[in-house]
Amino acid sequence: MQESVIYQKIVQQGVQQGLQQGRKEGELALIMRQLTRRFGSLDPLVQERLQRLSVPQLEELGEVLLDFSAVSDLAAWLDVQEQ
């Protein structure tokens, strides 16, 4: 059974999903640490909004957050992403 093509595809899909989830969690953890260091404790609603972002959005945020001067900049950026 482990040698079947279908089994191998299922295993490969599981591995890929696990890698994607791990990557997202890592990106999110880094961004949360950066934002917390820059602005202090983040509102739980903001944290929830951050968790809904995709990996490409998290990568973009990792770059643009360097230009933020206030939490309101983050909120405005999140508003644009949610549209």
Image (spheres, rainbow, N blue to C red):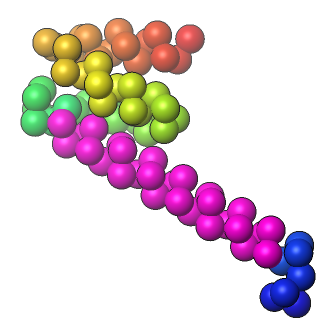
- Residue 8 appears anywhere in the view: yes
**Residue 70 horizontal side relative to residue 8, left or right:** left
The number of discs equals 0
Question: In the rendered image of this protein, does residue 47 appear above or below residue 7?
Answer: above
| Quadrant where the N terminus is found in the figure | bottom right
28 within the magenta span: yes
**Residue 63 horizontal side relative to residue 38, left or right:** right
Q: Residue 6, image x and y in percent?
A: 89, 73
- Residue 52 appears anywhere in the view: no
Where residue 45 sits, quadrant-wise, is: top left
Q: Residue 39, image x and y in percent?
A: 12, 26
Q: 44 or 33, which lies in front?
A: 33
Q: Outermost residue toward the bottom?
A: 1
Q: Residue 49, image x and y in percent?
A: 42, 30
Where residue 36 sits, quadrant-wise, is: top left
Question: In the rendered image of this protein, does residue 35 appear above or below residue 73?
Answer: below
Residue at point 88%, 75% (across, down): 5
Question: In the rendered image of this protein, does residue 37 appear above or below residue 77?
Answer: below
Residue at point 78%, 69% (across, down): 10
| Quadrant where the C terminus is found in the figure | top right
Residue at point 89%, 82% (across, down): 4
- Give the residues in magenta: 8-34
Where residue 46 sits, quadrant-wise, is: top left
27 within the magenta span: yes
Q: Main secondary structure of the magenta part?
A: helix
Residue at point 49%, 32% (across, down): 56
Q: Residue 60, image x and y in percent?
A: 39, 25
